[in-house]
Amino acid sequence: MSTLSPAREPLLIAGAGIGGLTTAVALSRRSIPSVVVEQAEELAPVGSGLQLSPNAVHVLRRLGLEEALLRHAVAPRAVSIQGGESGRTIAEVPLGATAVERYGAPYLVIHRADLQGVLHEAAKLSAGITLTFGTGLVDARQTEGRVRLTTERNGLSDILAGSGLVAADGVWSTVRRKVMNIRQAVYSGRTAYRAVIPIDDVPPEWRDVTGLWMGRDAHVVHYPVSAGTRFNIVVVVKEDWREETWSGPADRGALLARFARWSPRCRGLLERPESWLKWALCGMDPGMRWVDGRVALLGDAAHAMLPFAAQGAAMSIEDADALARAMETAGDVPEAFAAYEAARHGRAERVLRLARENDRIYHMSGPMAFARDMVMRTLSPERLLARLDWLYGWQPPRDA
């Protein structure tokens, strides 16, 4: 545990999600204090599954969190790619021991609440981290040498001051909109339907893999979570969003009707959950700036991306590592934030473009889908995996 200098002014972090908590822990490991401001009264165990590829696991390992992580995660044997309507296996991309051998760390799947719980516990046990829940961020202003936050709790306003502000407050970032005057994320025309069910309700063939079913204007992803006791299912469809909020309960019957012509193997999985929740998938365009002096965007606030590369959480974790490293070595906060953006911007936007390309590939139909499937069948499993070496093979620099 780090011993922190009490004279050093803390860095303010908006949001106690994956990006915000990872940033706080990474800063603590470098003896940099932080104050995390979170609107929610507590971190509720909600959400669904997410994927942690080796690039993200390397960061969490350096922070000393791998052992705690592995108590909740599953390392799938492979990604099994299926045709949505035909039900035929198109290809398998090896993970499991192959990923460890190739990248030096496992490819994991985990429930979002479990990952957030590991990070929250680490933050509570780390020196120099102040966690402030039930506190809304109203506004922020840069003055010479510091940032002043206006917050609200139980109807009462307060002012917090720090050396800088890290906005890890998600897709609908208040800081991005109010402080940096950057427009909000926009609806992508895709909706994600999510459900988590007991693993015993799932056929054994799906309990050790990540499944991907591709079809016209829709795809399905599923994998085990919660140390293999539960099963996460995500359905993404192309549709208009007509709700008043960006998430809510879904119509199970209407969802299943969308897949009436799909393979009985896939439909059988979709029929298992009794209820579904849905989220509008929103994203940012490439080319957005992330930094303004002593204010920096991080994670989804900086580069909200579609989930078709399974890298949303991983990019937030990588961002946190890069920002903490920059804070340790730069002369002041603006210099550190500029170095962080320079280090991260190109890679994050490459992943953003990959997610958009996968959106196109997953949802092909007709001759294009036939050609896609032929290419995947022709390539060896190792070559399919090697196409992502640039992504999964990334590791944080070694500390001096």
Image (cartoon, helix red, strand yellow):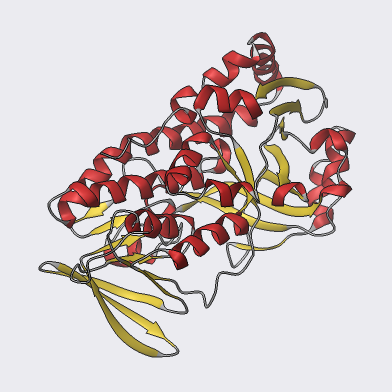
Numbered disc total: 0
Judge left or right: residue 340 versus residue 277.
left
Nearest the viewer among 373 and 15 is: 15
Nearest the viewer among 264 and 381 is: 381
- Where's residue 380, x and y in %? 64, 11
- Residue at x 86%, y 44% (from the top left corner): 202
- Residue at x 43%, y 55% (from the top left corner): 22
Whether residue 315 is visible here, answered yes or no, is: no
Q: Where's the C terminus, which quadrant? A: top left
Whether residue 159 is visible here, answered yes or no, is: yes
Relative height, residue 9 to residue 370 (above, below): below
- Residue at x 44%, y 60% (from the top left corner): 21
- Residue at x 42%, y 31% (from the top left corner): 394
Q: Furthest-left residue in view? A: 144
Judge left or right: residue 335 versus residue 215.
left
Q: Furthest-top residue in view? A: 378
Q: Where's the N terminus, which quadrant? A: bottom left
Judge left or right: residue 182 versus residue 251.
left
- Where's residue 76, x and y in %? 69, 35
Nearest the viewer among 344 and 200 is: 200
- Where's residue 349, x and y in %? 38, 37
